[in-house]
Amino acid sequence: MLPRSPTEALQPQRPPEPPERELPEDDSHPFLGMLDGLLNFVFIMACMAAAVFYFVRVEFDRPGPLPVSTVLVVPKGEGATAIAERLERDGIIADRRIFMTSILYFMYLKGEGTLKAGEYQFDKHATMRQVLDTLVEGKSIQYRVTLPEGWTSAQIVKRLAAHPELNGEAPEVPAEGSLLPDTYSFGSKDTRKEIVQRMQHAQSKFVAKMWEERDPDIMVSTPEEAVILASIVEKETGKAEERPHIASVFHNRLRKRMRLQSDPTIIYGLFGGIRDHPITQSDLERENPYNTYKIDGLPPTPIANPGRAAIEAVLKPAKTKDLYFVADGTGGHVFSATLAEHNRNVAKWRKIEREIRRAAGRRGRSRG
């Protein structure tokens, strides 16, 4: 076809559209298509299973989250699921689902034993494999050491050093108030240093938990101050039921900017916390940074290692208006809100003291 004009002659002509091709009909058998899809599905599932198995195996042998060695009690009759939840809750394993998968493989598919009840020692950063082996072998720990509330850190280290079943050298005396008194179970390979680390970890964990639950009206502003005051409460009474009341007295005194006037603080400042007879007037007059008859507020550090009850008493004290307390002669104390009432109670206590001394003198003469 000839162009109608010079302009049209310069423009290229569009090529014609290609003819439409007819798709060939699918003449494959439906069964073969289904089989091909099934094989693809099986292949994908096999790859996923292999990936999961590899992941579980890696996690099973990975060092666990436990920061210090610890002890776990598995009650009789507790199932594998409950045990796995307990392990995760106590920070011994990172993921109970992976642990349950491992139990399914090793115990039920390979028949390698069952989990046994008992009291078990788990080392720091124990792997899930080590945890599972310990529970299957059922080798319960055999030893215990009791560290009482109100002991100084030096006293605790001395007891650990004397325990015949513990290993290693006695550690340096840790900071006062940094240990949580309790009865600690341990295995034949545990060291004295590891027991101290467990006590520090337990104290830090307990104080953090109780600090979150504290009464908003308390007169301590940090967990460290709470431990200092708890150590004083611990040393003031041996009766657990009195601790919230004594804590209330100290909070009330701090609130009114009164000095704490606690005898145990003087004993700690002058004698390291250990003295087997009452302090004297000259002790009250001596200058030391722990003399709460002379200083305002709290002493610079705790004067002992308080137990759980004393720490809780300071963070959740009783609601009273009392500002004073004095011994009542029965191992407890009598409380008062006014100085006049307190002076009467002190006079009663002095009379009881004189009677105790006279009785002791008569016994001494009769023995002589």
Image (cartoon, rainbow, N blue to C red):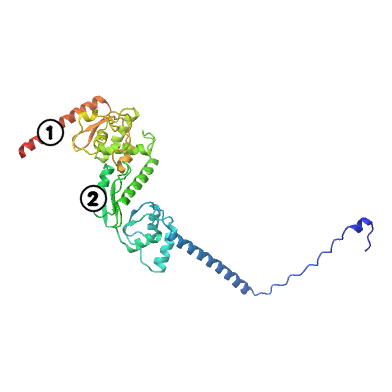
> Where residue 221 appears, x then y in whole percent?
38, 35
Above or below: residue 73 compared with residue 331:
below
* Tag 2: amino acid: Ala
Few, some or many residues within 10 Å of mark 1 (<14, 14–19, 20+): few
> Where residue 220 appears, x then y in whole percent?
36, 34
| Among numbered discs 1 and 2, the one appearing first in the sequence | 2
> Where residue 28 appears, x then y in whole percent?
66, 74
Between 312 and 198, the one lying in front of the other is: 198
State the residue at coordinates (90%, 57%).
10
Drawn side of residue 202 relative to residue 280, left or right? right
- Can you name the residue that lies furthest to the top here? 340
Indicate which disc residue 219 carries.
none
Q: Quadrant of the N terminus?
A: bottom right
> Where residue 292 appears, x then y in whole percent?
29, 31
- Reading the image, the residue beneath label 2 is 162
Q: Quadrant of residue 234?
A: top left
Q: Quadrant of residue 217?
A: top left
State the residue at coordinates (49%, 63%).
52
State the residue at coordinates (37%, 39%).
223
Q: Do callouts 1 and 2 mark residues in contact (Cβ within 8 Å)? A: no
Q: Secondary structure at mark 1?
A: helix
Drawn side of residue 4 relative to residue 70, left or right? right
- Residue 46 visible in the current orientation: yes
State the residue at coordinates (21%, 26%).
344
- Residue 316 visible in the current orientation: no
Indicate which disc residue 357 carries.
1
Few, some or many residues within 10 Å of mark 2 (<14, 14–19, 20+): few
Drawn side of residue 341 relative to residue 25, left or right? left
* Tag 1: amino acid: Arg
Above or below: residue 16 compared with residue 257:
below
In space, the residues marked 1 and 2 are separated at their CA atoms by 36 Å
Q: Secondary structure at mark 2?
A: helix
